[in-house]
Each structure stands twice: as C-alpha cells, then as structure tokens.
Amino acid sequence: MKRLTLWIALVALTLPLAACETVLPDAVTTVQPTFTSIYADYLYKCADCHAPGAMGSINGIEQSLDFSTQAKAHATLMTKAKGMSGNPSACNGTAFVVAGNPGKSLLLATLDSSVRQAFDTGDGSGCDVDSITDMTIRVQGGTPSSATLTALHDWIAAGAKND
Ligand code: HEC
C-alpha cells in the first residue's frame, strides 16, 4: 500500500513536468543570431516597401534596401542609405550595418528605440533620433520581440555575415 501511494505521488509529480516538456521546443527554437534566422523571423516583412516595385515603395523611400530575398537583404544592408527626402534625408550616407558596432548601425536604430535614442554617427551628419524613423510601426505584426532585437544586436556584434 505504501508503495502504491508513493507511485501515485510520483506520477502526479511527473505529469505536469511532462506537460511542460511539450511546450519547451517552442522556446528552444527561438530566433538565433544568424542572418538566416533573423531574416526568416522578421526582416522578410520589410519587403512590402523595401523592394523594387513593392506595393509600399513610394517617393522619398530609402533606395538602397531590398528585402525581397535573404541574399539581396544582406547585400543591400552592407551599403549606405540613399534617396530619402525631408527630415530622414540627414541619414542619407549612413551605413545600415557597421559590423562589430550595433550602436552605430542604422538598421538596429530603426528597430530598437533605445539604440535610436542614443544614435550618433559621430560625423556631424545629423542622423540621430530626430531623423530616424521607427520602422516597427510600419510592418504587419509590429514590434519585434526582445529575442529578435537581441539576435540582431548579437549578429551585428559578431561581424554581420550572411550566415
Ligand atoms: C510601409 C512601408 C515601409 C515598411 C513596411 C518599412 N519601411 Fe523602412 N522606410 C520606409 C520609408 C518611406 C523610408 C524613408 C524614410 C521615411 O520616410 O521615414 C524608410 C527608411 C528606412 C531606413 C532608413 C533609415 C531611416 O532614416 O529611417 C531603414 C534602415 C529602413 N527603412 C528599414 C526598414 C526595416 C528593417 C523594415 C522592416 C522591419 C522597414 N524599413 C519597413 C518605408 C517602409
């Protein structure tokens, strides 16, 4: 009898654990600090506007970026902003990604408000919080998760390769 009680107690204790385990894989397959993962997780959404002939491609839009494929997204992110008019024009000539330096990467500044607040190119261009637009309000699904922002930050810090 004592053994049976112990067994029931054990099963009762393990069941919730087993239930938890079925939830775990989701948490484990979260976004990784690689470009493949970050593009599939979030950046592909930007192609609604940033791609040649895209529906949301308008006059005065940034002209270097092309998010239509992972390869094009990476290649164009290695260039500098151009073609913007009005207030954001201060950021024409600013690098989207400075490998090894997330705080100076315009891409991260458009997605992470704390990076945007502190943004300073150091070259007197005036590309700062007042001229950088928050891109997260423009995409379907909105704000990236903190996991996405961390992955993006770590990917840039690690050299921003098309990995
Ligand atoms: C609804 C259309 C639209 C979407 C969606 C969009 N953008 Fe933009 N983006 C623009 C326009 C327009 C500009 C030019 C600056 C401005 O007018 O705000 C711009 C400018 C930029 C710039 C230049 C920096 C600056 O000054 O703001 C970056 C970087 C950028 N976008 C990245 C992104 C990323 C990354 C995404 C996806 C998360 C994205 N954009 C989604 C329209 C869009």
Image (tube, rainbow, N blue to C red):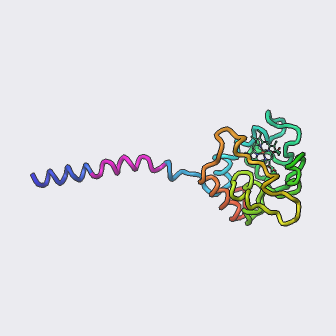
Magenta residues, start to end: 13-25
Quadrant in the picture for residue 112? bottom right
Which residue is nearer to you in this view: 94 or 43?
94
Q: Residue farthest to the left?
A: 1
For residue 88, side relative to residue 39 (left or right): right
Picture coordinates of residue 8, whole percent (x, y): 20, 49
Which residue is nearer to you in this view: 143 or 96?
143
Q: Is residue 4 visible?
A: yes
For residue 31, side relative to residue 139 (left or right): left
The mark tally for this picture is: 0
Q: What predominant SS class does the magenta segment belong to?
A: helix
Q: Residue farthest to the top?
A: 55
Q: Residue at x 79, y 35 (%)?
A: 56
Q: Is residue 129 above or below residue 22?
A: below
Q: Is residue 8 above or below residue 119?
A: above
Q: Residue at x 56, y 51 (%)?
A: 30
Figure quadrant of the C terminus: bottom right
Q: Is residue 75 visible?
A: no
Q: Residue at x 72, y 41 (%)?
A: 138
Picture coordinates of residue 150, whole percent (x, y): 62, 58
Picture coordinates of residue 64, whole percent (x, y): 85, 48
